């Protein structure tokens, strides 16, 4: 009996020893795990704090309208973070700025038509060209193309508005806005329009042998009638998709109102896409970079614009986006293929019969918006 009790006692101690050893191992592993988790959390928190401490530059622009690698280079050079905020239409950009009275952004990309309006509303600040030595590289004709642009903005790109079409699907060469606004029956549901009243109505007016900036009520009524007759043929009023999912690439659209550089971008996915400025003329445009009055990073904003206009960087931008750079010093870094492409750099004859959009009187602007809303119903 005593031997049995002794044996049981010994067995109990052995079992307890094993249990304690496993427990010690468990707690040791648990402690190591906790230390690892703590170290990871501390590391993550440190990185987050470091990122939070970095200066942030907020840039309001169209999506896919800058070389992302160039943005990274700027961030690295200045040890900052660039926060890109996008809009899909001019109206949306205006709504974003109106909602905050221009606050919350540092740099904004603006079509030439809106420059004077943004200056008048006090949203932007005059450029400090003493902090922007690359301004000497910018062609003066683009700096002065729109009222108040020369002192308040820096040109980003310039180009044309015309027609992009699938030459493998369209049975004839496209050369006139009449083919676009009075299409053949085969184009039913195959046409794309920009969701932009200035461009849509402007080109409709040009197709009728008027100036795109005509404010005559009769001319506007004729343009409205033309756009309404085109309506059944239009699949969408939207901002172009610049990927292989673009309806022009997939063949859902056969013909669309397009900006020249965007058409060239889509040619990478479908070489059957052709771009033309119609014989009646097309749209001319210049996009500008402006610094917000409310920005707390005005010097950094100026440095950002100056960085983009360093000749090699301006050339990288132009090559990436297939647009004409207003930066003359960038040309020596651009390929002959780029410089000699008539879609990017249209002839003098094409430019001479094309028009910039002009700021409409308030009543005309309202009338155009009403017409376009009625067309899209």
Image (cartoon, grey):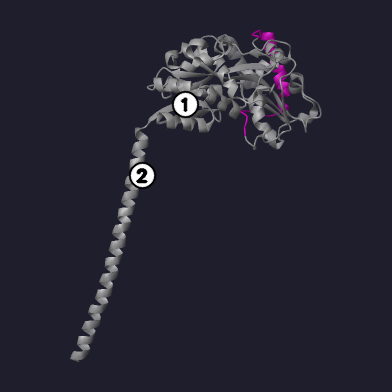
Whether the residues at callouts 1 and 2 have beta carbons within 8 Å, the answer is no
Closest to the observer, 357 or 234: 357
Q: Name the residue under label 2.
A: 44
Q: Is residue 122 magenta?
A: no
Viewed as shown, does residue 9 lie left or right of 195? left
Residue 249 visible to the viewer: yes
Query: Image point 73% across, 14% down: which residue?
Result: 280
The residue lying toward the viewer, choosing from 237 and 373, is: 237
- Residue range in magenta is 214-242
> Magenta includes 240?
yes
Residue 326 picture location, percent across and down: 57, 17
Mark 1 is surrounded, within 10 Å at the Cα level, by few (under 14), some (14 to 19) or many (20 or more) other residues, namely: many
Which residue is at the far left?
2
| Quadrant housing the N terminus | bottom left
Q: Which quadrant is the C terminus positioned in?
A: top right
Identify residue for label 1: 59
Q: Mark 2: which secondary structure?
A: helix
On the image, the x and y values in percent for residue 164 come to: 70, 26
Residue farthest toward the bottom in the current orientation of the protein: 1
Q: In which quarter of the image is residue 139?
A: top right
Total numbered badges shown on the rendered structure: 2
Q: Earlier in the sequence, mark 1 or mark 2?
A: 2
Lateral position of residue 54 relative to residue 199, left or right: left
- The residue at the point 30 percent across, 54 percent down is 35
Please state the horizontal and vertical placement of residue 361, each as a whole percent of the image: 57, 8
Q: SS for tag 1? A: strand
Query: 273 or 340, which lies in front?
Result: 340
Q: Which disc is residue 90 wearing? A: none
Residue 309 in the image, given as x and y percentages of width and height = 51, 21
Mark pair 1, 2: CA separation: 27 Å
């Amino acid at each position: 009996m005593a031997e049995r009790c002794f044996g049981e006692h010994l067995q109990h101690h052995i079992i307890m020893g094993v249990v304690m050893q496993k427990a010690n191992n468990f707690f040791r592993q648990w402690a190591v795990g906790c230390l690892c988790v703590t170290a990871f959390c501390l590391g993550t928190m440190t990185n987050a704090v470091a990122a939070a401490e970095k200066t942030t530059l907020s840039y309001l622009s169209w999506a896919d309208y800058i070389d992302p690698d160039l943005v990274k280079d700027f961030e690295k050079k200045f040890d900052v973070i660039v926060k890109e905020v996008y809009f899909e239409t001019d109206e949306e950009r205006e709504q974003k700025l109106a909602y905050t009275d221009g606050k919350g952004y540092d740099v904004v990309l603006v079509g030439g038509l809106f420059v004077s309006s943004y200056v008048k509303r006090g949203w932007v600040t005059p450029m400090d060209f003493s902090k922007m030595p690359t301004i000497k590289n910018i062609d003066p004709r683009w700096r002065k193309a729109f009222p108040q642009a020369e002192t308040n903005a820096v040109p980003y790109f310039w180009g044309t508005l015309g027609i992009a079409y699938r030459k493998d699907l369209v049975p004839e060469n496209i050369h006139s806005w009449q083919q676009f606004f009075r299409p053949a029956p085969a184009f039913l549901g195959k046409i794309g329009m920009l969701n932009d009243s200035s461009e849509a109505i402007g080109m409709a007016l040009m197709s009728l042998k008027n100036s795109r900036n005509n404010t005559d009520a009769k001319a506007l009524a004729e343009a409205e009638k033309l756009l309404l007759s085109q309506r059944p043929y239009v699949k969408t009023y939207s901002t172009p998709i610049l990927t292989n999912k673009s309806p022009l690439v997939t063949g859902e659209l056969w013909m669309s109102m397009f900006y020249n550089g965007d058409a060239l971008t889509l040619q990478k996915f479908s070489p059957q896409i052709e771009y033309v400025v119609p014989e009646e003329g097309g749209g001319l445009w210049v996009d500008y970079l402006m610094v917000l009055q409310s920005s707390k990073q005005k010097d950094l904003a100026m440095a950002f614009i100056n960085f983009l206009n360093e000749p090699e960087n301006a050339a990288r931008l132009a090559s990436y986006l297939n647009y004409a750079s207003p930066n003359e010093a960038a040309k020596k870094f651009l390929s002959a293929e780029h410089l000699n492409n008539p879609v990017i750099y249209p002839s003098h004859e094409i430019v001479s019969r094309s028009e910039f959009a002009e700021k409409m009187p308030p009543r005309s602007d309202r009338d155009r918006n009403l017409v376009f809303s009625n067309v899209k119903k």
